[in-house]
DNA sequence: AAGAACACCAACCGCCACCTT
DNA sequence: GAAGGTGGCGGTTGGTGTTCT
């Protein structure tokens, strides 16, 4: 016998989440951790599907999320990664701390795609339109080198990225080769494209006493402050490292001013 | 001022791989 | 081994706000 269905289709609410629902979900997860999404709606007193709860948490409520538009450098990183990984947004998001696959996917579809088209670059192949030919016998040296490097690095670093799901093979510059060498070599999250952007992210840089850049939390800092009432570390919240608590303390201090 | 068109993004849907019974 | 549930992923949709005519 299988299991019970993940959610009772009847009586399950859809559509935008209310602040009250958000609070219930946050409180539940902070109290119990991310355990079994199927059970979350019932235990948290939500008339939502577990899947919906998971999505809401991962895409919007997670405290380690950055908010706001992607920076120039993040955008460039997304383009570079997309040229290698294709539409594997979760893989791309894994290399941009604080960003979700949904967010990157949206940004790609609404901003980057148009930008590339405007520049005369095919957002699927990452090739200039005028360079695209049906199938050329010529493969540039740099292309071969790049592919070899990536293959090697994938073997070393990312065994799940197998060839069957390989992305568009259209990187054509040695610059990209260098970039991707570093990407594949540095498997842990790239901390962080935005930090290397000297111009556009001073707000984040202001927080660099922490280990990684936190989002601007103005929108939800109130409940984050409440987090201190729970034993968060006990629930396995990696995002709440010392830096996180530093930030919360800072926020609290600011709040009292 | 009003309606149309466009832009943005949160949320849903359907599929798949893996796991449990 | 089969059946069915779970979690995760990518594609798509629909609501809302903004800009254009």
Image (cartoon, coloured by chain):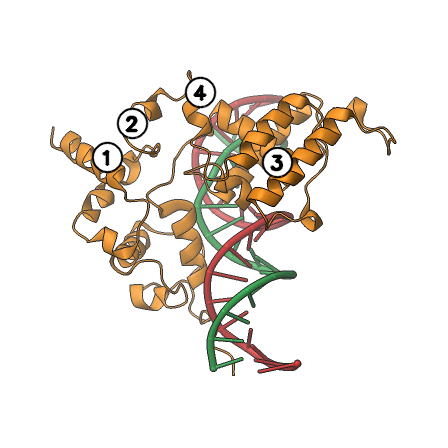
Chain colours: A orange, B green, C red
Determine whether the residue tagged by mark 2 lies in a helix, strand or loop: loop
The numbered mark 3 sits on a residue in which chain?
A
Residue neighbourhood size for the residue with mark 4, other residues' Cα within 10 Å, grouped as few (<14), some (14–19), many (≥20): some
Q: Earlier in the sequence, mark 1 or mark 3?
A: 3
Give the residue drawn at x 81%, y 29%: A139
Residue found 44% across the figure and 57% down from its top = A52
Q: Are marks 4 and 1 on the same chain?
A: yes
Q: CA distance from mark 4 to mark 1?
A: 22 Å
- Residue wearing tag 4: A197
- Do the residues indicated by labels 4 and 3 lie within the same chain of the protein? yes
**The furthest residue to the bottom:** A1
Q: Which residue is label 2 attached to?
A: A207
- Secondary element at image label 3: helix
Residue at (63% x, 21% y) in the render: A175
Q: CA distance from mark 4 to mark 3?
A: 20 Å
Residue A206 is left or right of residue A173, and the answer is left
Say whether marks 4 and 3 touch (CB < 8 Å).
no
Q: Quadrant of residue A123?
A: top right
Residues at marks 2 and 4, CA–CA distance in whole angstroms: 14 Å
Residue closest to the eye, A113 or A36: A36
Q: Given contact means CB atoms under 8 Å apart, are the residues at marks 2 and 3 in contact? A: no
Residue A247: assigned label = 1
Mark 3 lies on residue:
A82
| Precedes in sequence: disc 4 or disc 3 | 3
Tell me the distance, in whole angstroms, between the alpha carbons under discs 1 and 2. 8 Å
* Secondary structure under the numbered disc 1 in the rendered image: helix
Q: Which chain is disc 4 placed on?
A: A
């Amino acid at each position: 016998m299988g299991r019970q269905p993940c959610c009772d289709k009847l009586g399950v609410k859809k559509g935008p989440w209310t602040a009250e629902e958000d609070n219930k979900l946050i409180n539940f997860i902070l109290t119990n951790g991310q355990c079994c999404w199927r059970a979350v709606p019932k235990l948290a007193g939500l008339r939502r599907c577990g899947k919906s709860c998971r999505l809401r948490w991962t895409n919007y409520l997670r405290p380690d999320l950055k908010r706001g538009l992607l920076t120039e450098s993040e955008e460039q990183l997304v383009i570079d990664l997309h040229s290698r990984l294709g539409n594997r947004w979760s893989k791309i998001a894994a290399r941009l701390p604080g960003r979700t696959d949904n967010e990157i996917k949206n940004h790609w579809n609404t901003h980057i795609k148009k930008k590339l088209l405007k520049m005369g670059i095919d957002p699927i192949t990452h090739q200039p339109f005028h360079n695209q030919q049906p199938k050329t016998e010529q493969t540039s040296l740099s292309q071969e080198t790049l592919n070899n490097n990536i293959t090697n690095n994938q073997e070393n670093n990312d065994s799940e990225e197998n060839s069957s799901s390989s992305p568009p093979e259209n990187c054509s510059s040695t610059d990209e080769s260098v970039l991707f060498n570093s990407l594949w070599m540095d498997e842990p999250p790239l901390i962080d494209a935005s930090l290397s952007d000297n111009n556009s992210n001073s707000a984040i840089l202001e927080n660099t006493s922490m280990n990684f850049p936190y989002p601007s939390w103005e929108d939800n800092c109130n409940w984050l402050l409440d987090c201190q009432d729970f034993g968060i570390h006990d629930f396995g919240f990696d995002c709440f490292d010392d830096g996180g608590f530093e930030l919360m303390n800072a926020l609290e201090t600011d709040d009292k001013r």
